[in-house]
Image: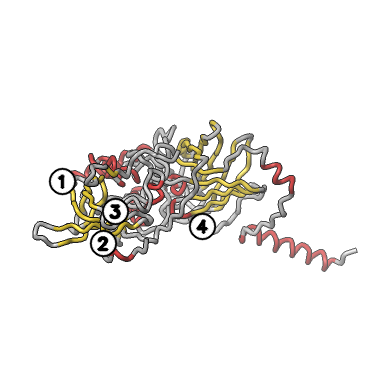
Amino acid sequence: MKSKRQIRFAFFAAAVACATVAVGQKVARKAPTAEDWTALAKLPDFTGVWEAGLGGGGGGRAGGRGAPPAAAPAAANGPAAATAGRAGGRGAGRAGGPSLTPAYAAKAKEQPAAPSAEENLTANCLPPGMPGIMGQPYPMEFLMTPGQVTIVIEAYNQIRHIYTDGRPLPEDPDPTFYGTSVGHWEGDTLVAETVGFAQVPRGITFPYSDKMKIVERFHLTAPDTMSIETTIVDPEALTAPYSMGARSLIRHRNWTIAEYICEENNRNSVDENGKAKVNLANPNASAR
Amino acid sequence: MKRNLKETAWRIIIGASLLAGGTSLAVAHHSYSAFDMAETRTVTGTIKKFDWTNPHTWIWIDVVNDKGVTETWGIEGMSPNYLARRGWNRKTLNPGDKISVTLHPLKTGENGGTWVDAKRPSGESLMMGGAITDP
Protein backbone atom coordinates (compact mmCIF):
# COMPACT_ATOMS: atom_id res chain seq x y z
CA MET A 1 0.00 0.00 0.00
CA LYS A 2 1.61 3.22 -1.15
CA SER A 3 1.31 6.35 0.90
CA LYS A 4 -0.26 9.46 -0.63
CA ARG A 5 3.15 11.01 -0.60
CA GLN A 6 4.63 8.17 -2.62
CA ILE A 7 1.79 8.40 -5.13
CA ARG A 8 2.26 12.13 -5.41
CA PHE A 9 5.97 11.58 -6.03
CA ALA A 10 5.20 8.99 -8.70
CA PHE A 11 2.94 11.49 -10.46
CA PHE A 12 5.61 14.15 -10.19
CA ALA A 13 8.25 11.81 -11.62
CA ALA A 14 5.95 10.85 -14.49
CA ALA A 15 5.26 14.51 -15.22
CA VAL A 16 8.98 15.27 -15.26
CA ALA A 17 9.55 12.32 -17.58
CA CYS A 18 6.83 13.54 -19.96
CA ALA A 19 8.22 17.06 -19.91
CA THR A 20 11.65 15.70 -20.70
CA VAL A 21 10.23 13.88 -23.71
CA ALA A 22 8.36 16.94 -24.94
CA VAL A 23 11.16 19.44 -24.53
CA GLY A 24 14.37 17.50 -24.83
CA GLN A 25 13.19 15.01 -27.47
CA LYS A 26 14.81 12.29 -25.42
CA VAL A 27 12.89 9.19 -26.37
CA ALA A 28 14.31 6.05 -24.83
CA ARG A 29 14.68 3.41 -27.50
CA LYS A 30 14.59 -0.26 -26.78
CA ALA A 31 17.45 -2.32 -28.06
CA PRO A 32 16.54 -3.88 -31.42
CA THR A 33 15.80 -7.57 -31.31
CA ALA A 34 16.47 -10.19 -33.97
CA GLU A 35 12.78 -9.91 -34.84
CA ASP A 36 13.16 -6.15 -35.38
CA TRP A 37 15.97 -6.76 -37.83
CA THR A 38 13.96 -9.49 -39.58
CA ALA A 39 10.94 -7.19 -39.83
CA LEU A 40 13.04 -4.71 -41.83
CA ALA A 41 13.23 -7.19 -44.68
CA LYS A 42 9.47 -6.96 -45.10
CA LEU A 43 9.66 -3.21 -45.79
CA PRO A 44 10.38 -1.79 -49.24
CA ASP A 45 14.14 -1.66 -49.68
CA PHE A 46 15.22 1.98 -49.87
CA THR A 47 18.85 1.25 -49.07
CA GLY A 48 21.56 2.43 -51.42
CA VAL A 49 22.70 5.55 -53.23
CA TRP A 50 20.15 7.61 -55.10
CA GLU A 51 20.37 10.64 -57.34
CA ALA A 52 17.85 12.83 -59.02
CA GLY A 53 18.38 11.67 -62.55
CA LEU A 54 19.88 13.45 -65.52
CA GLY A 55 22.94 14.34 -63.54
CA GLY A 56 24.16 12.46 -60.59
CA GLY A 57 26.56 14.33 -58.45
CA GLY A 58 26.09 17.53 -60.23
CA GLY A 59 22.96 17.86 -62.26
CA GLY A 60 24.29 17.83 -65.79
CA ARG A 61 21.38 19.55 -67.43
CA ALA A 62 20.80 23.23 -67.31
CA GLY A 63 17.35 24.13 -66.19
CA GLY A 64 15.93 23.67 -62.78
CA ARG A 65 15.23 26.95 -61.10
CA GLY A 66 17.15 28.78 -63.77
CA ALA A 67 20.40 30.14 -62.45
CA PRO A 68 21.77 32.75 -64.82
CA PRO A 69 24.36 30.52 -66.46
CA ALA A 70 21.63 28.24 -67.71
CA ALA A 71 20.92 30.88 -70.30
CA ALA A 72 24.56 31.35 -71.28
CA PRO A 73 25.34 29.68 -74.58
CA ALA A 74 28.68 28.17 -73.63
CA ALA A 75 27.55 26.88 -70.29
CA ALA A 76 26.41 23.48 -71.49
CA ASN A 77 29.75 21.84 -70.87
CA GLY A 78 30.92 23.91 -67.98
CA PRO A 79 30.42 23.87 -64.28
CA ALA A 80 27.68 26.41 -64.60
CA ALA A 81 25.30 24.17 -66.47
CA ALA A 82 26.18 21.29 -64.27
CA THR A 83 25.57 22.89 -60.92
CA ALA A 84 22.49 24.64 -62.12
CA GLY A 85 21.16 21.26 -63.17
CA ARG A 86 17.84 19.81 -62.45
CA ALA A 87 18.82 18.65 -59.03
CA GLY A 88 15.38 17.76 -57.91
CA GLY A 89 14.35 15.83 -60.96
CA ARG A 90 11.16 16.87 -62.59
CA GLY A 91 8.68 18.62 -60.40
CA ALA A 92 5.22 17.39 -61.26
CA GLY A 93 2.01 19.09 -60.34
CA ARG A 94 3.50 22.46 -59.51
CA ALA A 95 0.51 24.27 -60.87
CA GLY A 96 0.41 27.68 -59.28
CA GLY A 97 2.33 28.84 -56.30
CA PRO A 98 1.55 28.62 -52.62
CA SER A 99 -1.61 30.33 -51.45
CA LEU A 100 -0.57 32.67 -48.67
CA THR A 101 -2.79 33.99 -45.91
CA PRO A 102 -3.26 37.79 -46.04
CA ALA A 103 -0.78 38.33 -43.20
CA TYR A 104 1.92 36.26 -44.91
CA ALA A 105 1.16 37.72 -48.33
CA ALA A 106 1.96 41.09 -46.76
CA LYS A 107 5.18 39.66 -45.32
CA ALA A 108 6.11 38.26 -48.74
CA LYS A 109 5.91 41.75 -50.21
CA GLU A 110 8.35 43.08 -47.62
CA GLN A 111 10.81 40.22 -48.00
CA PRO A 112 13.80 40.80 -50.32
CA ALA A 113 14.20 38.54 -53.34
CA ALA A 114 14.98 35.18 -51.81
CA PRO A 115 17.12 33.46 -54.45
CA SER A 116 20.10 35.77 -54.11
CA ALA A 117 20.10 35.37 -50.34
CA GLU A 118 19.97 31.59 -50.74
CA GLU A 119 23.01 31.60 -52.97
CA ASN A 120 24.93 33.94 -50.74
CA LEU A 121 25.06 31.56 -47.89
CA THR A 122 25.75 28.34 -49.78
CA ALA A 123 28.66 30.15 -51.45
CA ASN A 124 29.96 30.60 -47.93
CA CYS A 125 29.47 26.84 -47.37
CA LEU A 126 26.31 27.09 -45.30
CA PRO A 127 24.10 24.16 -46.32
CA PRO A 128 20.45 24.84 -47.11
CA GLY A 129 17.83 23.52 -44.67
CA MET A 130 14.85 21.32 -45.51
CA PRO A 131 13.57 20.89 -48.16
CA GLY A 132 16.46 22.42 -50.14
CA ILE A 133 18.96 19.90 -48.83
CA MET A 134 16.91 17.11 -50.48
CA GLY A 135 17.29 18.75 -53.89
CA GLN A 136 21.03 19.25 -54.09
CA PRO A 137 22.81 18.18 -57.26
CA TYR A 138 24.55 15.33 -55.44
CA PRO A 139 23.41 11.84 -54.46
CA MET A 140 21.93 10.66 -51.16
CA GLU A 141 22.26 7.31 -49.41
CA PHE A 142 19.32 5.77 -47.56
CA LEU A 143 20.00 3.51 -44.58
CA MET A 144 17.31 1.46 -42.82
CA THR A 145 17.71 0.23 -39.27
CA PRO A 146 15.04 -0.79 -36.74
CA GLY A 147 12.98 2.28 -35.92
CA GLN A 148 14.88 4.67 -38.16
CA VAL A 149 15.53 5.68 -41.75
CA THR A 150 18.71 7.70 -42.15
CA ILE A 151 19.52 9.80 -45.20
CA VAL A 152 23.19 10.56 -45.80
CA ILE A 153 23.39 13.55 -48.11
CA GLU A 154 26.59 14.00 -50.07
CA ALA A 155 26.18 17.75 -50.53
CA TYR A 156 27.85 19.48 -47.58
CA ASN A 157 28.17 16.07 -45.82
CA GLN A 158 24.76 16.29 -44.17
CA ILE A 159 22.52 13.72 -42.44
CA ARG A 160 18.78 13.47 -41.79
CA HIS A 161 17.21 11.09 -39.30
CA ILE A 162 13.62 9.93 -39.74
CA TYR A 163 12.40 8.11 -36.61
CA THR A 164 9.97 5.31 -37.40
CA ASP A 165 9.75 3.84 -33.91
CA GLY A 166 6.29 5.17 -33.20
CA ARG A 167 7.30 8.26 -31.25
CA PRO A 168 5.10 11.33 -31.65
CA LEU A 169 6.22 14.52 -33.30
CA PRO A 170 7.79 16.82 -30.72
CA GLU A 171 5.45 19.51 -29.43
CA ASP A 172 7.97 22.28 -28.94
CA PRO A 173 11.08 21.37 -30.90
CA ASP A 174 14.15 23.53 -31.14
CA PRO A 175 14.07 25.17 -34.57
CA THR A 176 16.79 23.70 -36.77
CA PHE A 177 17.90 23.45 -40.41
CA TYR A 178 16.35 20.02 -41.01
CA GLY A 179 13.72 19.98 -38.25
CA THR A 180 12.75 16.82 -36.40
CA SER A 181 11.40 14.03 -38.59
CA VAL A 182 9.06 11.23 -37.55
CA GLY A 183 7.93 8.65 -40.07
CA HIS A 184 5.41 5.86 -40.42
CA TRP A 185 4.58 3.36 -43.10
CA GLU A 186 1.34 3.51 -45.06
CA GLY A 187 1.57 0.29 -47.01
CA ASP A 188 4.71 0.57 -49.11
CA THR A 189 4.99 4.33 -48.61
CA LEU A 190 7.16 5.92 -45.95
CA VAL A 191 5.43 9.08 -44.78
CA ALA A 192 7.82 11.44 -43.01
CA GLU A 193 6.55 14.47 -41.16
CA THR A 194 9.02 17.13 -40.16
CA VAL A 195 8.56 20.09 -37.81
CA GLY A 196 10.74 22.65 -36.07
CA PHE A 197 12.29 24.91 -38.68
CA ALA A 198 14.65 27.79 -38.06
CA GLN A 199 14.42 30.82 -40.31
CA VAL A 200 17.43 29.88 -42.43
CA PRO A 201 17.80 29.57 -46.20
CA ARG A 202 16.03 26.36 -47.13
CA GLY A 203 14.80 26.78 -50.71
CA ILE A 204 11.40 28.06 -49.64
CA THR A 205 10.77 31.38 -51.32
CA PHE A 206 7.73 32.45 -49.27
CA PRO A 207 7.63 33.47 -45.61
CA TYR A 208 6.70 30.62 -43.27
CA SER A 209 5.79 30.31 -39.62
CA ASP A 210 7.10 28.15 -36.79
CA LYS A 211 4.03 25.95 -37.34
CA MET A 212 5.29 24.79 -40.72
CA LYS A 213 5.28 21.04 -41.31
CA ILE A 214 6.88 19.33 -44.30
CA VAL A 215 5.36 16.00 -45.33
CA GLU A 216 7.32 13.68 -47.60
CA ARG A 217 5.97 10.49 -49.13
CA PHE A 218 8.68 8.08 -50.28
CA HIS A 219 7.83 5.06 -52.37
CA LEU A 220 9.39 2.85 -55.02
CA THR A 221 7.81 3.20 -58.44
CA ALA A 222 10.22 0.66 -59.99
CA PRO A 223 12.95 -1.51 -58.48
CA ASP A 224 15.52 1.28 -58.70
CA THR A 225 13.26 4.33 -58.92
CA MET A 226 11.93 6.22 -55.94
CA SER A 227 9.31 8.92 -55.90
CA ILE A 228 9.40 11.63 -53.26
CA GLU A 229 6.28 13.73 -52.97
CA THR A 230 6.72 16.80 -50.80
CA THR A 231 3.96 18.92 -49.33
CA ILE A 232 4.26 21.96 -47.10
CA VAL A 233 1.59 22.57 -44.49
CA ASP A 234 1.54 25.84 -42.57
CA PRO A 235 -1.73 26.90 -40.94
CA GLU A 236 -0.42 30.43 -40.33
CA ALA A 237 1.24 31.13 -43.67
CA LEU A 238 -0.74 29.01 -46.13
CA THR A 239 -4.47 28.81 -46.78
CA ALA A 240 -4.02 25.25 -48.10
CA PRO A 241 -1.25 22.63 -48.15
CA TYR A 242 1.28 23.48 -50.84
CA SER A 243 2.40 20.57 -52.98
CA MET A 244 5.94 20.76 -54.35
CA GLY A 245 5.06 17.83 -56.58
CA ALA A 246 6.80 14.50 -56.91
CA ARG A 247 10.44 14.01 -57.79
CA SER A 248 12.05 10.86 -59.06
CA LEU A 249 15.34 9.45 -57.83
CA ILE A 250 17.39 6.73 -59.50
CA ARG A 251 19.33 4.13 -57.51
CA HIS A 252 22.93 3.45 -58.52
CA ARG A 253 23.88 0.10 -56.99
CA ASN A 254 27.60 0.62 -57.59
CA TRP A 255 27.87 4.16 -56.26
CA THR A 256 29.22 5.20 -52.92
CA ILE A 257 28.81 8.55 -51.23
CA ALA A 258 31.91 10.70 -51.56
CA GLU A 259 33.30 13.18 -49.08
CA TYR A 260 32.23 16.81 -49.53
CA ILE A 261 34.02 19.15 -47.17
CA CYS A 262 32.91 22.51 -48.52
CA GLU A 263 35.40 24.40 -46.38
CA GLU A 264 38.32 22.45 -47.82
CA ASN A 265 39.13 24.84 -50.64
CA ASN A 266 36.23 27.25 -50.96
CA ARG A 267 37.32 30.28 -52.94
CA ASN A 268 33.78 31.56 -53.43
CA SER A 269 32.03 33.91 -51.08
CA VAL A 270 29.34 36.50 -50.98
CA ASP A 271 29.81 39.59 -48.90
CA GLU A 272 27.25 41.29 -46.68
CA ASN A 273 25.97 43.29 -49.66
CA GLY A 274 25.23 40.15 -51.64
CA LYS A 275 28.21 40.61 -53.94
CA ALA A 276 29.79 37.36 -55.13
CA LYS A 277 33.57 37.17 -54.88
CA VAL A 278 36.23 34.73 -55.93
CA ASN A 279 39.52 34.53 -54.07
CA LEU A 280 42.51 33.73 -56.26
CA ALA A 281 45.10 34.37 -53.58
CA ASN A 282 47.70 31.75 -52.72
CA PRO A 283 47.27 28.93 -55.22
CA ASN A 284 49.33 26.74 -52.90
CA ALA A 285 46.75 26.91 -50.11
CA SER A 286 45.33 23.50 -50.99
CA ALA A 287 47.51 20.49 -50.33
CA ARG A 288 45.83 18.21 -52.83
CA MET B 1 24.17 47.64 -71.05
CA LYS B 2 24.97 43.98 -71.31
CA ARG B 3 24.84 43.71 -67.55
CA ASN B 4 21.48 45.41 -67.41
CA LEU B 5 20.11 42.95 -69.90
CA LYS B 6 21.49 40.10 -67.86
CA GLU B 7 19.94 41.46 -64.71
CA THR B 8 16.65 41.78 -66.48
CA ALA B 9 16.93 38.19 -67.64
CA TRP B 10 17.71 37.16 -64.09
CA ARG B 11 14.64 38.91 -62.76
CA ILE B 12 12.47 37.25 -65.37
CA ILE B 13 13.89 33.86 -64.46
CA ILE B 14 13.38 34.45 -60.75
CA GLY B 15 9.91 35.78 -61.36
CA ALA B 16 9.02 32.76 -63.46
CA SER B 17 10.30 30.40 -60.81
CA LEU B 18 8.28 32.18 -58.13
CA LEU B 19 5.20 31.90 -60.28
CA ALA B 20 5.90 28.24 -60.89
CA GLY B 21 6.18 27.51 -57.21
CA GLY B 22 7.23 28.73 -53.84
CA THR B 23 10.29 26.57 -53.58
CA SER B 24 13.60 26.30 -55.32
CA LEU B 25 15.27 23.00 -54.65
CA ALA B 26 18.07 23.16 -57.17
CA VAL B 27 20.34 25.68 -55.53
CA ALA B 28 23.91 25.37 -56.67
CA HIS B 29 26.85 25.99 -54.37
CA HIS B 30 27.14 29.52 -55.69
CA SER B 31 25.76 31.78 -58.34
CA TYR B 32 27.94 32.65 -61.29
CA SER B 33 27.53 36.38 -60.89
CA ALA B 34 31.25 36.84 -60.22
CA PHE B 35 31.96 35.57 -63.74
CA ASP B 36 31.10 37.22 -67.02
CA MET B 37 29.04 34.35 -68.41
CA ALA B 38 28.49 36.18 -71.71
CA GLU B 39 32.24 36.28 -72.39
CA THR B 40 34.56 33.42 -73.19
CA ARG B 41 38.28 33.44 -73.71
CA THR B 42 40.92 30.82 -74.13
CA VAL B 43 44.21 30.70 -72.26
CA THR B 44 47.06 28.41 -73.24
CA GLY B 45 49.81 27.40 -70.91
CA THR B 46 51.26 24.81 -68.57
CA ILE B 47 49.49 23.21 -65.61
CA LYS B 48 51.09 24.47 -62.42
CA LYS B 49 48.76 22.73 -59.98
CA PHE B 50 45.48 20.81 -60.00
CA ASP B 51 43.43 21.08 -56.81
CA TRP B 52 41.25 17.96 -56.58
CA THR B 53 39.16 19.58 -53.86
CA ASN B 54 35.66 20.53 -52.78
CA PRO B 55 33.57 22.46 -53.34
CA HIS B 56 35.38 22.97 -56.64
CA THR B 57 38.45 21.75 -58.40
CA TRP B 58 40.90 24.52 -59.26
CA ILE B 59 43.20 24.39 -62.23
CA TRP B 60 46.21 26.68 -61.96
CA ILE B 61 47.94 27.40 -65.25
CA ASP B 62 51.10 29.35 -66.00
CA VAL B 63 50.45 31.46 -69.07
CA VAL B 64 53.04 33.63 -70.83
CA ASN B 65 51.35 36.91 -71.69
CA ASP B 66 52.00 39.05 -74.78
CA LYS B 67 54.79 40.87 -72.94
CA GLY B 68 56.59 37.61 -72.31
CA VAL B 69 55.74 37.63 -68.61
CA THR B 70 54.43 34.44 -66.99
CA GLU B 71 51.11 34.91 -65.19
CA THR B 72 49.26 32.28 -63.17
CA TRP B 73 45.60 31.80 -64.04
CA GLY B 74 43.14 30.19 -61.61
CA ILE B 75 40.23 28.36 -63.19
CA GLU B 76 37.33 26.94 -61.24
CA GLY B 77 36.03 23.52 -62.22
CA MET B 78 33.36 21.11 -61.07
CA SER B 79 33.70 19.25 -57.78
CA PRO B 80 35.74 16.04 -57.60
CA ASN B 81 32.50 14.24 -56.61
CA TYR B 82 30.89 15.30 -59.87
CA LEU B 83 33.94 14.71 -62.04
CA ALA B 84 34.80 11.30 -60.59
CA ARG B 85 31.47 10.04 -61.91
CA ARG B 86 32.47 11.30 -65.35
CA GLY B 87 35.80 9.62 -65.80
CA TRP B 88 38.03 12.18 -64.15
CA ASN B 89 40.43 11.57 -61.30
CA ARG B 90 43.07 13.55 -59.43
CA LYS B 91 45.67 12.60 -62.05
CA THR B 92 43.66 13.70 -65.11
CA LEU B 93 45.65 16.94 -65.08
CA ASN B 94 49.26 16.99 -63.94
CA PRO B 95 51.84 19.71 -63.38
CA GLY B 96 53.73 20.30 -66.61
CA ASP B 97 50.83 19.31 -68.89
CA LYS B 98 50.25 21.71 -71.78
CA ILE B 99 46.64 22.80 -72.09
CA SER B 100 44.31 25.37 -73.65
CA VAL B 101 41.34 26.21 -71.46
CA THR B 102 38.26 28.08 -72.56
CA LEU B 103 36.67 29.94 -69.68
CA HIS B 104 34.21 32.57 -68.60
CA PRO B 105 36.47 35.25 -67.10
CA LEU B 106 36.09 36.92 -63.73
CA LYS B 107 34.35 40.28 -63.95
CA THR B 108 37.13 41.83 -61.86
CA GLY B 109 39.62 41.37 -64.69
CA GLU B 110 41.85 39.19 -62.52
CA ASN B 111 43.50 36.18 -64.12
CA GLY B 112 40.76 33.73 -63.38
CA GLY B 113 37.51 32.26 -64.58
CA THR B 114 35.18 29.31 -64.64
CA TRP B 115 35.97 26.33 -66.87
CA VAL B 116 33.98 25.83 -70.07
CA ASP B 117 36.16 23.22 -71.79
CA ALA B 118 39.78 22.51 -72.69
CA LYS B 119 42.04 20.84 -75.21
CA ARG B 120 45.38 19.14 -74.94
CA PRO B 121 47.99 19.62 -77.72
CA SER B 122 47.02 16.13 -78.95
CA GLY B 123 43.57 17.49 -79.69
CA GLU B 124 42.03 15.51 -76.84
CA SER B 125 39.03 17.42 -75.50
CA LEU B 126 38.51 17.71 -71.77
CA MET B 127 34.87 18.21 -70.87
CA MET B 128 33.54 18.51 -67.34
CA GLY B 129 29.84 18.30 -68.00
CA GLY B 130 29.70 15.05 -69.89
CA ALA B 131 27.52 12.04 -69.34
CA ILE B 132 27.89 9.84 -66.30
CA THR B 133 30.45 7.17 -67.10
CA ASP B 134 29.95 5.27 -63.86
CA PRO B 135 26.33 4.08 -64.10
Residue A224 image position (x, y, % from top left)? 53, 35
Taking the spot 43% from the left edge, 48% from the top edge, the residue there is: A132
Residue bearing mark 1: B2
- What is the chain letter for disc 3? B
- What is the chain letter for disc 1? B
Badge 2 or badge 4: first in the primary sequence: 4
Q: Are marks 3 and 4 on the same chain?
A: no
Residue A218 image position (x, y, % from top left)? 55, 39
Q: Are marks 2 and 1 on the same chain?
A: no
Q: In the image, what residue type sits under mark 2?
A: Leu
- The local crowd at label 4, few if under 14, some if 14 to 19, many if 20 or more residues have their Cα within 10 Å, is some
- The local crowd at label 2, few if under 14, some if 14 to 19, many if 20 or more residues have their Cα within 10 Å, is some
- The local crowd at label 1, few if under 14, some if 14 to 19, many if 20 or more residues have their Cα within 10 Å, is few
- Would residue B50 be found to the left or right of residue A92 on screen? left
Residue bearing mark 2: A280
Residue B128 image position (x, y, % from top left)? 32, 45
Task: Provide the secondary structure element on which disc 3 rests.
Answer: strand
Q: Of the residues tagged 2 and 4, which is closer to the observer?
A: 2
Q: Of the residues tagged 2 and 1, which is closer to the observer?
A: 2
Instruction: Say which of A112 and A142 sits in front.
Output: A142
Residue bearing mark 4: A175
Q: CA distance from mark 2 to mark 1?
A: 25 Å
Taking the spot 42% from the left edge, 35% from the top edge, the residue there is: A90
Instruction: Say which of A109 and B60 sits in front.
Output: B60
Which numbered tag is attached to residue B76?
Answer: 3
